Image: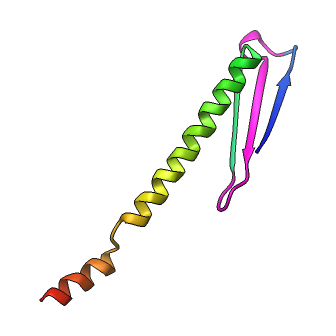
Amino acid sequence: MRVELECDPKQSVSTRFSAKGHIEIYGPDFNASVQADECHKAVSLLIDKLDRMLSRRSKMQKAKRHSMNTVDLAADVNSTL
């Protein structure tokens, strides 16, 4: 996991601090960025966003693993007849 924090005093107050995060895992990598008026708030928003991305990926993989494919369903129906 890589996190970058930036402070640009030339930006407006509401977008002065930006936080960027990058997570490298098996499969597609995750990139997220947020902007906020305070540094700690930007980090907190970034953590929440990355957490949502990871939990969504986990739920999608579980759904894929537990769902029956149409080929499997057809084979089950034919074997019972």
- Number of callouts: 0
Along the viewing direction, whichever of 36 and 24 lies nearer the viewer: 24
| Res. 80 image quadrant | bottom left
Residue 67: x %, y % from top left: 35, 65
Looking at the image, the residue that sits furthest to the left is 81
Looking at the image, the residue that sits furthest to the right is 9
The quadrant of the rendering that contains the N terminus is top right
Residue 25 is covered by the magenta coloring: yes
Looking at the image, residue 54 sits to the left or right of residue 81; the answer is right
Residue 36: x %, y % from top left: 70, 19
Q: Is residue 8 above or below residue 49?
A: above
Looking at the image, residue 56 sits to the left or right of residue 4; the answer is left
Along the viewing direction, whichever of 6 and 52 lies nearer the viewer: 52
Q: Which residues are magenta?
A: 11-29
The quadrant of the rendering that contains the C terminus is bottom left
Residue 62: x %, y % from top left: 44, 58
Residue at 33 percent of width and 70 percent of height: 68
Along the viewing direction, whichever of 11 and 71 lies nearer the viewer: 71
Residue 55: x %, y % from top left: 52, 45
Residue at 78 percent of width and 20 percent of height: 17
Residue at 69 percent of width and 56 percent of height: 25
Residue 54 is covered by the magenta coloring: no
| Res. 45 image quadrant | top right
Residue at 82 percent of width and 16 percent of height: 11
Q: Is residue 18 above or below residue 28?
A: above
Looking at the image, residue 68 sits to the left or right of residue 22; the answer is left
